[in-house]
Image (cartoon, rainbow, N blue to C red):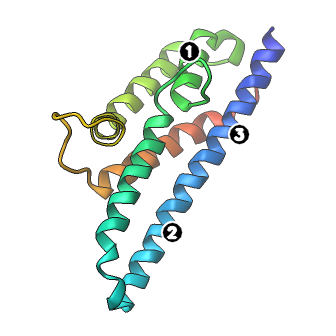
Amino acid sequence: MKRARRAKWQRWIATIGEELERLGAWRDARAAALSALEVLPELRAAAGLLHETYVHALAMGVRRQLKPGSRNVCLGGLLAELADHAHEAGLDAAEVRRDLAALRRRLKPVESFADRAVAHADRRAPASLSVHTLHAALDALAAVHAKYADRKW
């Protein structure tokens, strides 16, 4: 069982890494698109749509990494499982739990926005979410992923 669990963790780390790379590529594509919009005045009207689409898509991508479920691979689920089986992974369960709690706190504004403004039409939805907040959340995910991706299971 330990070998199967470790193999699963390795698959999850790889899958999460691919997802974070994809979200990072969106960030790069947004920057390129904004640069193009600056030199093509006829497309400036599209900037609002580009911004809204980007914020919604990235917010859902960040949220997806936090919300564990029985069938989805996410960093939040991986950390919860690593904390429960820290002895098998050669980790300190308390440290893993602290990392997960810190990540949840850091991503809370994004999760709230994604749940209330993107996934549902909740009257408590925040009016907007800053790109800075989104990028900070993506950076936090990448940092925690990197910390655990370097492990040899």
Gap in Å between the C-alphas at discs 2 and 1? 35 Å
Mark number, residue 27: none
Q: For residue 38, what is the image quadrant?
A: bottom left
| Residue assigned mark 1 | 83
Tell me where residue 120 appears, x and y as whole percent: 31, 35
Point 31% across, 56% down: residue:
132
Residue 3 lies, with reference to residue 65, above or below; the image says above
Name the mark on residue 14.
Answer: 3
Q: Decide which of tag 2 and tag 3 comes sooner along the chain.
A: 3
Residue 15, position as x, y percentages in the image: 68, 39
Residue at 26% over, 50% down:
129
Amino acid at dot 1: Ala
Quadrant of the snapshot with the N terminus: top right
Looking at the rendered structure, the secondary structure element under dot 2 is helix
**Disc sitting over residue 29 in the figure:** 2
Q: Quadrant of the C terminus?
A: top right
Between residues 37 and 19, which one lies in front from this camera angle?
37
